[in-house]
């Protein structure tokens, strides 16, 4: 049958793409009953036991039908359900084994495809991409709903990890997951925050647009962190630094939530085994409070570029924007920061000298100087760039900037608005993906040992 179809197409001078599509479609039709057969076999073999506590279920109904949307089309399976007395819940053991979720019409592969499509493509274009790449016709609303469902699962997994940090036993459990090497290593933690745009009246857009009303949107903070081992940092042939493996954290739920999630992630990346820990960030005070709360053993470092920006601020203010005098003054002090052991102290001393010796400072210049003296004074112990360079540690939070850029690329794209709760679910889904834990949602993705 398929052979005849292919022959007919070939005789008409079909191109290979058309042949591929034709065969792909037929193969799907062939595969559908086989998938149904296999799935039914799994269902028929199920012992009627509670998937949570393993005690026997009181069977309530046999052979109940369920329709599933699979990559080969719709199939129907029959399975039984029962009630667990101990858990006081109803279960379909077959659904549990097959990886089918309650009230979710999509199969695991369809859920996986939906999740990736929604994370990668602006919402409106996802169905078209999915159709072209997989031949599946999934409406945008279904794609979004299924991805959201997986996002919520990712959120539950994340929150379960965070809950582990409350007990010593849990901390040990997280720590055991790390694949830290035997030899001594340094763990680097970088922290930052960025904005996400959010629409506030989700679901009312069309109505408002029709009425010519404004669609309000707001910018909200997303708190972000990244964790990696220093020995996981490499260099490309052109000398650009890259990191082979690292952990990500992103949340919209505030600094405290970030702190807990970052701690859970750091534990899984070797926090307890690390010989030294380095926290790198800009000058934001909340970051350093977080570091002191959670990573007591850590060395702190203010991103070098941020520190130099503060020197440029003074230079431009005193000697005029980008004048030769400003440049000379700034470059000299930047070198102190980079090369002297107590470069930050020397910078502070020189700021004080200017403050005291120049009589004709405007009040605005005085204010700038006082502000910057304060800045360097607050962070002077976080500016040991000379030692950092000797230890071949990063002096700037470049890894953090690229992390933020990656998240922004996904979440700040034009036309990509999420609802309030949705944001966090999609952030969790993206983060789980980047953290290499996709198999926790989709066990079929687990690599064979
Ligand atoms: Zn049970």
Image (cartoon, rainbow, N blue to C red):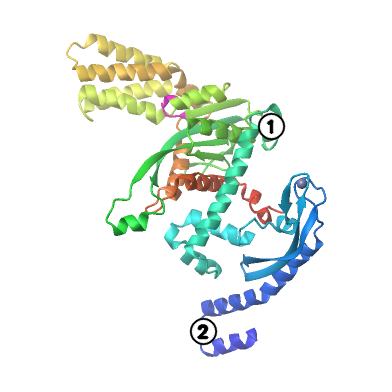
Q: Mark on residue 14?
A: 2
Residue 362 image offset from top left, x and y in percent: 18, 17
What residue is shown at x 45% (from left), y 37% (from top)?
398
Q: Is residue 183 left or right of residue 22?
A: right
Real-space CA distance between mark 2 and mark 1, rounded to the nearest whole angstrom: 61 Å
Mark 2 / mark 1, whichever is N-terminal: 2
Residue in view at x 68 percent, y 69 percent: 76
In this view, the residue in front, 255 or 322, is 255
Callout 1: SS: helix
C-beta proximity under 8 Å, tags 2 and 1: no
User: Secondary structure beneath disc 2?
Assistant: loop
Name the quadrant containing residue 319.
top left
In the image, residue 177 lies at what x, y percent?
A: 68, 38
Residue 99 lies within the magenta run: no
Q: Nearer the viewer, residue 222 or 343?
A: 222
Query: Which range of residues does the magenta coloring cover?
Result: 281-285
Residue 295 lies, with reference to residue 235, above or below; the image says: above
Q: Main secondary structure of the magenta part?
A: loop
| Residue position marked by numbered label 1 in the rendering | 170
From the viewer's perspective, tell me whether residue 365 is left or right of residue 409.
Answer: left
How crowded pointer 1 is (Cα within 10 Å; few <14, some 14-19, many 20+) is rated as some
* Observer-nearest of 213 and 433: 213
Q: Position of residue 158 (x, y in %)?
A: 60, 41
């Amino acid at each position: 049958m398929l052979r005849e179809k292919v022959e007919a197409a070939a005789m008409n001078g079909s191109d290979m793409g058309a042949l591929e599509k034709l065969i792909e479609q037929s193969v799907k039709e062939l595969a559908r009953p086989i998938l149904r057969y296999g799935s039914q076999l799994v269902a028929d073999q199920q012992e009627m036991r509670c998937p949570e506590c393993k005690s026997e279920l009181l069977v309530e109904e046999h052979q109940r039908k369920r329709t599933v949307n699979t990559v080969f089309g719709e199939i129907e399976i029959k399975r039984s359900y029962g009630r667990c007395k101990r858990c006081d819940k109803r279960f379909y053991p077959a659904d549990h084994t097959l990886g089918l979720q309650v009230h979710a019409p999509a199969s695991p592969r369809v859920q996986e495809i939906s999740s990736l499509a929604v994370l990668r493509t602006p919402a409106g274009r996802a169905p078209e991409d999915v159709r072209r790449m997989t031949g599946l016709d999934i409406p945008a609303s279904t794609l979004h709903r299924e991805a959201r469902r997986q996002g919520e699962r990712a959120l539950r997994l994340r929150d379960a990890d965070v809950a582990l940090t409350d007990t010593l036993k849990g901390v040990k459990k997280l720590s055991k997951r790390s694949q830290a090497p035997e030899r001594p290593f340094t763990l680097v933690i970088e922290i930052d925050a960025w904005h996400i745009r959010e629409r506030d009246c989700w679901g009312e857009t069309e109505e408002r647009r029709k009425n010519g009303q404004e669609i309000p949107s707001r910018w909200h903070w997303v708190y972000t962190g990244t964790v990696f081992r220093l020995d996981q940092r490499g260099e490309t042939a052109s000398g650009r630094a890259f990191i082979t493996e690292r952990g990500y954290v992103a949340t919209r739920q505030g600094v405290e939530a970030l702190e807990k999630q970052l701690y859970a992630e750091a534990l899984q990346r070797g926090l307890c085994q690390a010989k030294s820990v380095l926290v790198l960030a800009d000058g934001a005070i909340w970051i350093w409070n977080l570091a002191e709360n959670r990573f007591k053993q850590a060395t702190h470092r203010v991103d070098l570029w941020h520190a130099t920006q503060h020197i440029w601020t003074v230079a431009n203010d005193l000697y005029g924007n980008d004048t030769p005098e400003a440049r000379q003054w700034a470059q000299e002090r930047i070198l102190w920061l980079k090369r002297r052991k107590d470069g930050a102290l020397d910078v502070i001393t020189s700021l004080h000298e200017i403050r005291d010796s120049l009589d004709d400072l405007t009040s605005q210049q005085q204010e700038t100087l006082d502000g910057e003296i304060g800045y360097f004074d607050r962070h002077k112990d976080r500016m040991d760039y000379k030692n950092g360079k000797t230890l071949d540690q990063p002096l700037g939070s470049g890894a953090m900037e690229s992390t933020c850029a990656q998240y922004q690329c996904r979440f700040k794209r034009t036309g990509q608005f999420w609802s309030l709760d949705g944001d966090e679910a999609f952030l969790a889904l993206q983060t789980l993906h980047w953290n290499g834990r996709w198999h926790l949602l989709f066990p079929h993705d687990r690599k064979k040992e």
